[in-house]
Every structure is written in C-alpha cells, then in structure tokens.
Amino acid sequence: MKIIDGGNVCSAKGFQAVGLACGVKEGAKDMALVFSQEEASGAAVYTKNKVQAAPIQVCREHLADGSAKAVVLNSGNANACTGEEGLANARRMCGLTAEMLGLDAAEVLVCSTGVIGVQLPMEAIETGIPQAAKVLSGKGGKDAAEAIMTTDTVPKTFAVEVDIAGVKVRIGGMAKGSGMIAPNMATMLSVITTDADIAPELLRKQLGLAVRRSFNCITVDGDMSTNDTVIVLANGASGAPAIEGSGEAADDFYAGLEMVCRELARLIARDGEGATKLVSIRVNGAGNEAEARQVGLSVANSNLVKTAVFGRDPNWGRILCAVGYAGVDIDPDKVAVSLCGTPIYGAGAGLDFDKDRLIEAMGAEDIPIEIDLGQGPEQAEIFTCDFSYDYVRINAEYTT
C-alpha cells in the first residue's frame, strides 16, 4: 500500500471537486461539490443520534439503490431541526446540482454542517451551486476540504494506492470535524472516493466495518451531533476487476479503505477544539474487541484524564478510575497501564517512575496511553485530544 502525498477526493480517477465561498459564511469557503464522471456505487454511514438533520433523510432516500454520482455540501449551517422547509431545501440542493450536472436528483447526495436550528440561506445556496458546477476540476480536492470546515483549524485529506489483481486502485477522502466529536459518529462529515469497482452491498459492509474501527473510535468531547455522515463513492475508473464478494481483492481494498478512514479520524482528533495534543489510547488484553473499545472510550471521554494530559500531570489514578467504571468485568490486579512509554500501574498498585522525566515526555504533541486488561487476545485503539482552556472559550462563544 502506498500513501499518496497530498491525496484527497480527486486522487482516484474520474473524480472532480470544487470548494468556494457563496455567502453562507462570511468571508470563507462554504460550498463544496464532489462529482464522479462515471457511474458509481455508493454507501454511507450516519449518526445514531435520534435527532437527525434533513440531509440525512435525503441521503438515505437517494442511496436506496446503492448508487450516486455527486455530493453537494455546505458549511456554516447544519439544516438540522428545520422542519419541512429544511427538508425541501435539502432536496432543492440535490435538484439544482443535478440540473447543473445533467443528472437525476436521486444521483446527488447532500450534506450540511454548522449551526443547528437555522434555515439555510437559499439565495446564497442557489447562487453557489451553479458557480461550483461550472468550475469542477480534478485539482479541486483541497478547496473542497477547506469549504466544509467549521471550527476546524486545518483541512483534512488523505489517500492511498493499493494493488487489486495487478491494477493500481486509489482511495482518497476528505473530512471535517473538531468539536461535538463522539462515536456513532460526531459532528463530522467525510466523503471518500475510489476508482475501484465494488458491488454496492459489499461496499456498504466494508464501510460500516471501517467506520467502526476509525470514526467510531474517536472522541473530543463526548457530544454526538445531528448531521454526521460518511459517504463513499466507487466508480470503477481504474479498470481493475470488479470486487463482488469475499477474497483477496476484497481484503486488499478493505485495508486501503480502513487506512483512509483511520487517518482522517486521527486528523479530526488531533484538531479537536482547543486541542494541543493527540491522545492515542491502545487497549490490549481484552476478551473481545467491543470490550476493548468500551474501556478505551471510557478513558478517552474522561474530562479528568483529558485535563491531566493538558496539564502534563501523570496521574494514573484518573486513568485507572475510567477503566474501572467502563462497565467491563475486569480484575484490577491484572491491569497494567503505561503513559508515554513509561509503566505507571501494575499488579494492583502504582509503580515507581521518574516523575520529572514523564512530565517532560507529556509535553509532546502525541501522547500514547497503553492499557493491558490481562484477560484476552483482543485490542482496540481510540483517539482523543486534551481538554484545554480554549475548548471552553470556543464553545461558549459559538453563536455569540
């Protein structure tokens, strides 16, 4: 597998994109469009929040046949909790995009992100979509990633190249997310593109598994949003043989898909609102993968752990406490904990360690926490960030 330098949604053959400002936000890109020039299989995974934005309902309808050719996205307004008018506006975004690209409206998917409970400024949207359609380009992936940002500080893109039966296949993507980040999924959007030829049902299954092991393994603040969507389009433009069932080709494709999802997820966690550090929590020795994830997320969602990381406080008691209330049956005497490579707890008690050296190590941008439950062969890795003063400031001032 090869990582593509600067890879994005246009890395795969047959895809174009664009990102521009149309006036939803003031003075910043806020409209993005991703387009496959070929017929494409499509699949998506959505938030499990019971309150779901209008675009999610429209995406579910349009993906019922397992195909799509375009995704239109806006930032600055979530089009969530906006009633029938919001639903009509989401459908209007698809219809206008289809009109400009010569498609059927059902071939277009829609995503929105931003403030909840405010109607879309449709005059700006109806100006922006035609502008975007006219300047679609195979070089527009970076601009598209910038256009879906809200409180993000950097655009998030990643792509890889894998070998499928001797043919080079590319998988690339973009994502946004910084706050309201919690599994199932978060206030995040992601569009992934590939020039592989893969059957819709298999694509759906593989995306679901990849999301479970990536986007559903990140948390910034434990808040789950209303708009979270991950979409993948596969257009077959690489010329590689069709992937229709299990086997080596399916496994190779999945490895690339999971890597793209995982790296985009890591970028979201690293860019958490107010974050200064990326925290990677690896849980080993679990009875099963679900329990490993449950323990990891318990530690990752602990505000006491997150503030300790921010303050460079090697307080192992906070980590062990979060392990203990995770709801997994453990034996504390079998648990071992390391922080930044330094063993700090084991055999039922704290271990002697050089505190000053560990405090210095905690000044790094990447903070690894390793937990061994000592009761099985399974593992999981969860990504989060520290909890800083700026997180409170950003969210206290979000609409004011």
Image: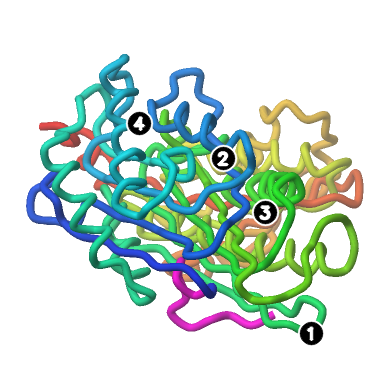
- Residue assigned mark 2: 318
Residue 91 tag number: 4
Q: Are marks 3 and 1 in contact (CB under 8 Å)?
A: no
Is residue 270 shown above or below 2? above
Q: Is residue 102 above or below residue 49?
A: below
Q: Earlier in the sequence, mark 3 or mark 1?
A: 1
Secondary structure under badge 3? Answer: strand
Callout 3, which amino acid?
A: Glu
First reached walking from the N terminus: tag 3 or tag 2: 2
Q: Are marks 1 and 2 in contact (CB under 8 Å)?
A: no
x, y percent for residue 81 = 32, 19
Q: Looking at this rendering, what residue extends furthest in the top direction?
A: 83
Question: Label 4 sits on what residue type?
Answer: Arg
Task: Name the one closer to the observer, 307 or 113.
Answer: 113
Tell me how far mark 4 sits from mark 2, CA to CA: 48 Å
Quadrant in the picture for the N terminus: bottom right
| Left or right: where 185 falls relative to 381 | left
Query: Is disc 2 surrounded by few (<14), some (14 to 19) or many (20+) residues within 10 Å?
Result: some
Residue, disc 3: 381
Residue 356 appears anywhere in the view: no
- Where is residue 262 shown, x and y percent of the image? 60, 59
Give the residue number, with chain letter if any, for mark 1.
166
Q: Which residues are magenta?
A: 1-11
Q: Which marked residue is nearer to the observer: mark 3 or mark 4?
A: 4
Q: Amino acid at mark 1?
A: Gly
Q: CA distance from mark 3 to mark 2?
A: 19 Å
Q: Position of residue 302 (x, y in %)?
A: 52, 37
Secondary element under disc 2, as helix, strand or loop, is: helix
The prevailing secondary structure element of the residues shown in magenta is: loop
